[in-house]
Amino acid sequence: MTPRRAPLGFASVPIKTCANQDGVSGNSKIDIPLLNRVTSPGSVRLADREEADVCVEFFARHLTEDNVFSREFLCPMGVRAAVTRGQVIVCKVGLEVIAAVRFYCRKRTACVSIYQFAVNPTWRGHRLSLEMIKAVPRGLRISCCSPSSSLNEYYVKTGWTLRRRSCQKNEWTLPCSSAEQSPPL
């Protein structure tokens, strides 16, 4: 079944995006009241298939190798596939994408991998990406970056927890809200 495409920030909208712990897909209500105030009359929702090229262009313009853990996340085909699977949230003002988050719901756990996120520099400082990441249905959010990446400062500043550190990557987690149940690690 194709995920429903509807505004996320203006009401609680059931969106089919991830399977639950049993591997059965289910609807999750998503509401981002903060984004109503910041982007109104904006639209925060899952990207439509027709917006795949717009998402590719947005990420190409706003991501650098410093912002992604693996060069594969810069691949346009991966972004297009994620849009098709209903795994990209966009925030738009008018026709312009001002923020986007690409995620992947892990199959064996209730964790969500955050692959990419970016905000147009004009709109930074409003915590858009953090609120969009929190809106992804399910439990623990996990994101990786290089130990030398400038993203480490962002993760500290926005309340992520450093879960693992190695010479190759830092693994950061953002706990689920109190309404969600934390998955076993």
Image (cartoon, rainbow, N blue to C red):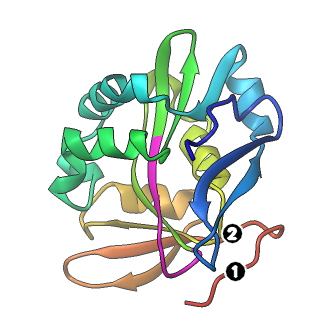
Asked which quadrant contains residue 18, the reply is bottom right
- Write the residue at 55% across / 21% down: 92
Asked which quadrant contains residue 110, the reply is bottom right
Q: Please state the horizontal and vertical placement of residue 60, each as a whole percent of the image.
A: 24, 32
What label does residue 176 carry, if any? 2
Would you say 28 lies left or right of 153 here? Answer: right
Marks 2/1: CA–CA distance: 6 Å
- Which residue is at the front of the view, 19 or 109? 19
Q: Amino acid at mark 1?
A: Ser
- Write the residue at 63% across / 79% down: 22
Q: Quadrant of the C terminus?
A: bottom right
- Which residue is at the front of the view, 26 or 61? 26
Residue 120 visible at all: no
Q: Please state the horizontal and vertical placement of residue 96, each as a whole percent of the image.
A: 47, 14
Label 2: state its secondary structure. Answer: loop
Q: Please state the horizontal and vertical placement of residue 103, each as a whole percent of the image.
A: 46, 54
What label does residue 182 carry, if any? 1
Residue found at the far top of this picture = 94
What label does residue 8 carry, if any? none
> Over which residues does the magenta segment extend?
101-110
Badge 1 crowding class, 10 Å Cα cut-off, few under 14, some 14 to 19, many 20 or more, is some
- Indicate yes or no whether the magenta region holds residue 178: no
Above or below — where is 184 with respect to 11? below
